[in-house]
Image (cartoon, rainbow, N blue to C red):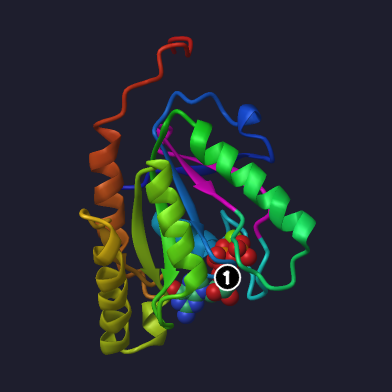
Amino acid sequence: MIIHEAEFLQSNTNFQKCPEPIWPEYAFIGRSNVGKSSLINMLVDKKNLALTSARPGKTQLINHFQVNKKWFLVDLPGYGFAKVSKTSRAKWAKMIYSYLESRENLMMIFLLIDSRIPAQKIDLEFINKLATMGLPFVLVFTKTDKVSKNTTNTTVAEYTKILSETWETLPLMFITSSEKKIGRDQVLDYIDSCNKLFVKPEKVNPL
Ligand code: GTP
Ligand code: MG
C-alpha cells in the first residue's frame, strides 16, 4: 500500500469522543517505550507525526491519525512503566479497556513486543487478556535493529511456545525496526487486506 497522506486528527481520554467510526481502525499498544509512536511514524513515513521520546510515558491519550483519508491509526499510551501511581494505572486501564471493547470500527490491535528481551509477564498477561476478551490482535516485535537475528528469533520462538500451551490459534507475528524500516511493507499490506473486510457500522450516518 502506498501512503499518500497522514494527518493528526485528535486526542481523547474517552472513546465516545473519538472520531466517528466510519473508517477501519488499527490501534497500537504495548509497554511504555516499546516503540509504538515510532512504528506509526515509520509506517506513514513522517518523522514526527506521533510524538516519541526516549523516556517512557510519552503518549498519554488516545491519539487518532487518518491515513489516505480512508483509515485510522491510533497511538495509545503504554503500560508497565514502573514510575506510575496506582491511580494512574487504574485510569489507564479504564480508558484503554473501554476503548478497546467499545470501538466498533476497530479492525485489529497491534500489540508491540520488545524483541530484545525474553518474554515478560506483563506482556503475556496483556496478550491473554485480549484473547480472553475476544479482541483481534497481532504481535509486532520491535527494535530488531538493536539485536542479532538470532536474538529476535529466540524471542519469537519463546512467545510461540508459551502461547501454544494455552491457545490453539496463534496470532500473526511481524518483525520490525522503525529505525531501519524493517517490516513496513508487511504491516501495510496486512492493513490493506483488513481494510477490504471493513463494514461500516450501521447506525453511523452515510457519508
Ligand atoms: P510511550 O508513548 O512512552 O508508551 O512509548 P512508545 O512505545 O510510543 O515508544 P516511542 O516510539 O516513543 O520510542 C521509545 C524510544 O525507543 C525512542 O527513543 C525511540 O527512538 C526508540 N525506538 C523506537 N523504535 C525503535 C527502533 O525500531 N529501533 C531503535 N533503535 N530505537 C527505537
Ligand atoms: Mg508513544
Q: Which of 109 and 125 lies nearest the eye of the viewer?
A: 125
Left or right: 197 as drawn, with respect to 205: left
Q: How far from the left and from the top, in percent, is residue 20? A: 53, 24
Left or right: 144 as drawn, with respect to 90: left
Q: Which of 37 and 32 lies nearest the eye of the viewer?
A: 32
Q: How far from the left and from the top, in percent, is residue 80? A: 61, 67
Q: Residue at x 26, y 81 (%)?
A: 153
Q: Quadrant of ligand 2?
A: bottom right
Q: Is mark 1 within 8 Å of ligand 1?
A: yes
Q: Can I make out residue 109 in this image?
A: no
The quadrant of the rendering that contains the C terminus is top left
Give the SS element for disc 1: loop
Which quadrant of the view contains residue 14?
top right
Q: Which of 188 and 12 lies nearest the eye of the viewer?
A: 12
Left or right: 174 as drawn, with respect to 116: left
> For residue 145: magenta?
no
Residue for badge 1? 33
Q: Residues within 10 Å of mark 1 (few under 14, many from 20)?
A: many
Q: How far from the left and from the top, in percent, is residue 160? A: 26, 69
39 lies above or below 90: below
Q: Residue at x 56, y 54 (%)?
A: 49
- Image: magenta residue range: 59-76
All told, the count of numbered labels is 1
